[in-house]
Amino acid sequence: MNSVSDVVSNEEIAGWIEEISSFGIRRPGTLADSKAEEYIVKKFEEFGLTDVEKQPYQISKWDAREWKLIVKESEVPCFYTPNTAFTSEDGVEGEMVYLGDGTTKDFEAVEVKGKIVLINVHFPSLPVSLLESMSYFVWDPEETLKDLAHPTTWIYPNWWMAYRLACVNKAAAIVGILADYPTNENRLYIPYFGPLNQEIPDWFLSRLGLPGPIPGWLPGLWVGRVDGENLVKTVRETRRPIRAHLTLTGGVEPATTHNIVALLPGQMEDAIVVHSHHDGPWNSAVEDASGVAEVLAVAEHLAKIPLSERQKTLVFLSTGTHFGGPARGDTTFIESNPSIASKLELDVCIEHIAKDFDAEEGRWIDTGMPEPRAVFTQGGSKEATQQLVYTLASEAQKHDLQRLIILPGNTPLGVPTDAMGFHRAGYPIYSCISGPEYLFDPCDTMDKVAVDQLNPVASAFIETIKKIDKAPPSEIRGH
């Protein structure tokens, strides 16, 4: 496997990931995430970058304290559904009703006012063949992507619809069974972008297929697949109505997080941003300590290149709210840095250097391969996009980044990454990401990181950035 010889090694990059993930659960506004910020600042300064800055902005910090589900006087293993409503210390009590997948017809068939709704939550599979049909380029010389249907734990539209319908019909609470999750884990940190009583953008509502805003705010809990199956059996086989008691206490408080910004000045003001996000749902080695470490590797290498050999200003960015809100780190950066934004040519976003795992009998099994990955690519014109695709494709082959698909930014998926804000603002992007099933699970630990891919991925993007650095800005912006 090819690499750039003076890029830091797989082992050193892995060491950075291990240090970041050792700080603890890095949700925005937490002490662990603050430690990650300080770590990134010190690394940027150590590499000789200039104008290293922690740029603060305000968020709403949702924080659960206690949660419990009691059904027929027995406690059911559960976990909070992040960003849903809180109950009082006494909780809520009501009849539990099972509504299958929580469709409109399911809600029309049963009166749910004041009741606790139980539904199945599904994660649809995304056929790789469908992605290939939309792609610009695929690098899969061993044909391991053939016939692969990849589960997507970041897509769960039936829960969103059921949650909205539960609010509309004045249910007391909602319990979601993680029916498609391969283990009995219930600690998935989804939905993750901020309290659901705050404004959700119209474009996001339309992507979820929701007819309008969520008119309310209910408490929610997750139960694992096996525990959920047992719970459904209990509800169905009991002739009389079943009473359930649900508690979810906590609060939403204002908090501060930071975008970490550092510069590597070039001979021109035209800028290339290289970024990832430092927050995560758990200790989260893949999500996204791995992305931050890749940004550090790129920064460390490019900072060694003399100014006389660098044309464009490089901006290294670590955003603060992929897992909080309502403010996003990418859009906040654009709004807070107008001088950079006005000269911004390209955003390079690197996330999730992950191993591929299958699940057998409720256990994760390492397949020995990297997780399939996509790079969403969009230039300022058709010709600019073609240049971006060709440049990255050649480096992907050179560094043997197997199981990689280059996709346009206008597929039905959109750009489901931390580069979304840059893309929606009209900037050209390279956004590299993978979506393993375990991404929001506390099992996202160092064993899930594709260590052998760390140097090759960094090397491929370093060489790509060097080539883009030499291209006239108009060739990328398209004007």
Image (cartoon, rainbow, N blue to C red):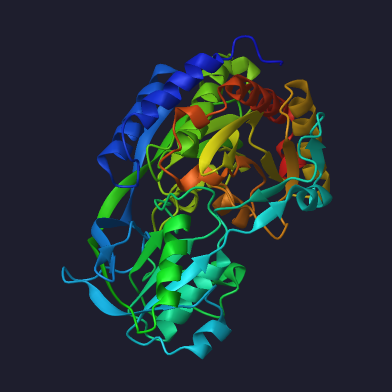
| Vertical position of residue 22 compared to residue 122: above or below | above
Of residues 111 and 220, the one drawn nearer to the viewer in this rendering? 111
| Vertical position of residue 204 compared to residue 56: above or below | below
Q: Residue drawn at (35%, 84%), measured in percent from left and top?
A: 240
Whether residue 354 appears in this view of the structure is no
Q: Residue drawn at (35%, 27%), measured in percent from left and top?
A: 39
Task: Give residue 7's quadrant in the image.
Answer: top right
Question: Where, quadrant-wise, is the N terminus in this rendering?
Answer: top right
Residue 448 drawn at (x, y percent): 51, 31
Of residues 317 and 392, the one drawn nearer to the viewer in this rendering? 392
| Vertical position of residue 104 compared to residue 414: above or below | below
Name the residue at the top extreme: 5
Q: Is residue 6 left or right of residue 410?
A: left
Residue 211 drawn at (x, y percent): 56, 80
Task: Give residue 77's quadrant in the image.
Answer: bottom left
Of residues 352 and 469, the one drawn nearer to the viewer in this rendering? 352
| Vertical position of residue 72 compared to residue 364: above or below | below
Q: Residue drawn at (64%, 9%), measured in percent from left and top?
A: 5
Residue 283 drawn at (x, y percent): 37, 37
Query: What is the number of callouts on the image?
Result: 0
Of residues 472 and 53, the one drawn nearer to the viewer in this rendering? 53
Residue 277 drawn at (x, y percent): 46, 40
Whether residue 308 appears in this view of the structure is yes
